[in-house]
Amino acid sequence: MDLDEPVNCAACGYDLTGVGWEGHCPECGRFYDKASGRGVARGAGVLSPVERGDRVIMLAKLGAYGALALGCLVWGGIASLSSPMPARPLILGMIGGGAFGFAVYATWFIDRRDGP
Ligand SMILES: [Zn+2]
């Protein structure tokens, strides 16, 4: 692995980029070894378990809203085929799909702005 790759102490998140391949974290003194990956967290930033959980919840919400939006559109399309008034389910489906589609956008936008 590249020595310049962003590496953080797994214990305290201290930026270990540019320090030796192995040793003790200057911040908390915990042993780390970049070669084996012991005691280090890779990536540009270290996510705490809470942040990681938030991201999972956000993705789950996006998936659920997206599925509902798609479900509304599909339902509208299918219902319009068998309905005596095809425009009505089609419009309802588009309104529902649009509402959930907007929820996806809003969730993504808000979480993105508050995120790291
Ligand atoms: Zn540390």
Image (cartoon, grey):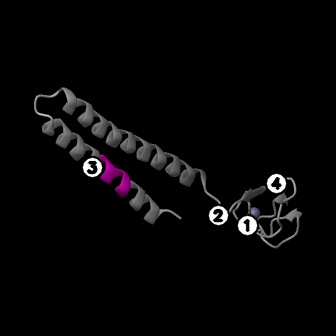
User: Is the CB of the residue bearing disc 3 within 8 angstroms of ligand 1?
Assistant: no
Q: Residue furthest bottom?
A: 18
Compute the Cα span from label 3 to label 1.
40 Å
Picture layout, residue 68 above or below residue 1: above
Please, what secondary structure does the residue beneath circle 4 have?
loop
Q: What is the spatial separation of the Cα atoms under label 4 and label 3, in whole angstroms?
A: 46 Å
Amino acid type, label 1? Pro
Q: Residue at 23% of width from left, 40% of height from top?
A: 93
Residue at 49 percent of width and 62 percent of height: 115
Where in the figure is residue 60, as x and y percent of width and height?
A: 46, 43
Q: Which residue is mark 4?
A: 37
- CA neighbours of label 4 inside 10 A, class few (<14), some (14 to 19), many (20+): some
Residue 76 sits in quarter = top left
- Asked whether 101 falls inside the magenta stretch, the response is yes
In magenta, the rendered stretch is: 98-106
Q: Which mark is residue 6?
A: 1
Sequence-first disc among 1 and 2: 1
Residue 98: assigned label: 3
Q: Quadrant of the N terminus?
A: bottom right
